Amino acid sequence: MQGFGTIINSILTLGLAMIVGFVCIKTGYITDEQKNGLSKIIVKVTLPLLIISSLTQLEFDHEKLVNSIYVLVISAIVVLLLFGIGSVTAKIGRMEKRMGAMHRCMMTFGNVVFMAFPLIQALYGAEGLLYATIYELANDLCLWTIGVYQVTGISKEKSSFFSNLKRLLNPGTIAFAVAFILMAVGFKFDGIIGEVIEGIGGTTTYLSMLFIGGTLARVDFKHIYKRIGLFVLTLLKMVIVPVILMFILKLFNIDETAAAVIILQAAMPVSTVLVVLGMEYGGDVDYCAEGVFISHIAGLALIPLVYYIMGLV
């Protein structure tokens, strides 16, 4: 594994960028409308170019193909495992319907793009980003099926299964498919075109942190210290489950980088997308937003901790 200093520097960089976004929204220097526009730029422009520029730098071989298949299968299993843990803990906590549905989703779906991609790329380069993108595919498949089913069950309004599956066809997945094909045939972008694609894609890290910081700025955290359940959820999702995964994955002959990416993706903070889904379908938005805030702030310390434990295991 790479040096522990790498993840500390990466986390500090991401944390400082989040603070900038937080301050900009909190002071009104940037409006919510501008922040939402920033999200669209990331999802539709910079992130797809980051995926394309990074994956086309890789030398594709049989080993990476096999690892990719392993990562896809294991990632789907991990996401379903997290959902099962969320269901059990919601039942133990005797949560009412609105909170229970959000709790299960919060335990299951992490910030596997905005937070994870920049961090994993810094730690493991283009190969790490390849496996991180595959984990995202498994995550999104479950999010737009199981996750949406959970949230829509709160209200009478139901969302079509096939309309949710269509959400899988987005700029990120299209970019991954294109990049995977280009990587397989050995195509690389050179010259000015390569520089432009890499340059624009490289802005994803800081733009993503600005967006996350701006999102956290809108959370009312006056009574957040009373949410003991959210601190338990954060510890369970971001430390205990990833540590258990370390020992489980050790039992199988899985590439070290692929295993590390799966573990870190599972350890990511609560997905910000869930707040939007909760608002749309009547979920406990306050509970979810506070969970997003706690997990992202705690993640600045817990993610390096998980990485450090990985080095020991």
Image (cartoon, rainbow, N blue to C red):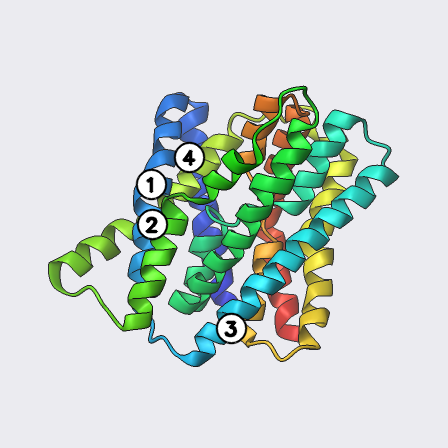
As measured in the structure, the alpha-carbon distance from the residue carrying label 3 to the one carrying label 2 is 22 Å
Foreground mark, 1 or 4?
Answer: 1
As measured in the structure, the alpha-carbon distance from the residue carrying label 1 to the one carrying label 4 is 20 Å
Foreground mark, 4 or 2?
Answer: 2
Residue named by callout 1: 44
As measured in the structure, the alpha-carbon distance from the residue carrying label 2 to the one carrying label 1 is 7 Å
Residue sitting at 72 percent across and 71 percent down? 247
As measured in the structure, the alpha-carbon distance from the residue carrying label 4 to the one carrying label 2 is 22 Å
Residue sitting at 62 percent across and 21 percent down? 157
Residue named by callout 3: 67
Inspect the image, locate mark 1, and give the three-letter code of the amino acid beneath it.
Lys
Residue 162 lies, in percent from the top left, at 53, 37
Q: Is residue 140 left or right of residue 267?
A: left
Foreground mark, 3 or 4?
Answer: 3
As measured in the structure, the alpha-carbon distance from the residue carrying label 3 to the one carrying label 4 is 36 Å
Instruction: Determine if residue 234 is in view.
Output: yes
Residue sitting at 68 percent across and 68 percent down? 246
Quick check: marks 2 and 1 in contact, CB under 8 Å?
Answer: yes
Q: Is residue 151 left or right of residue 5?
A: right
Residue named by callout 4: 21
Question: Residue 33 lies in what quarter of the image?
Answer: top left
88 or 301, which is in the foreground? Answer: 88
First in sequence, mark 1 or 3: give its number. Answer: 1
Residue named by callout 2: 48
The vertical placement of 264 against 33, above or below, is: below
First in sequence, mark 3 or 4: give its number. Answer: 4
| Disc 1 secondary structure class | helix
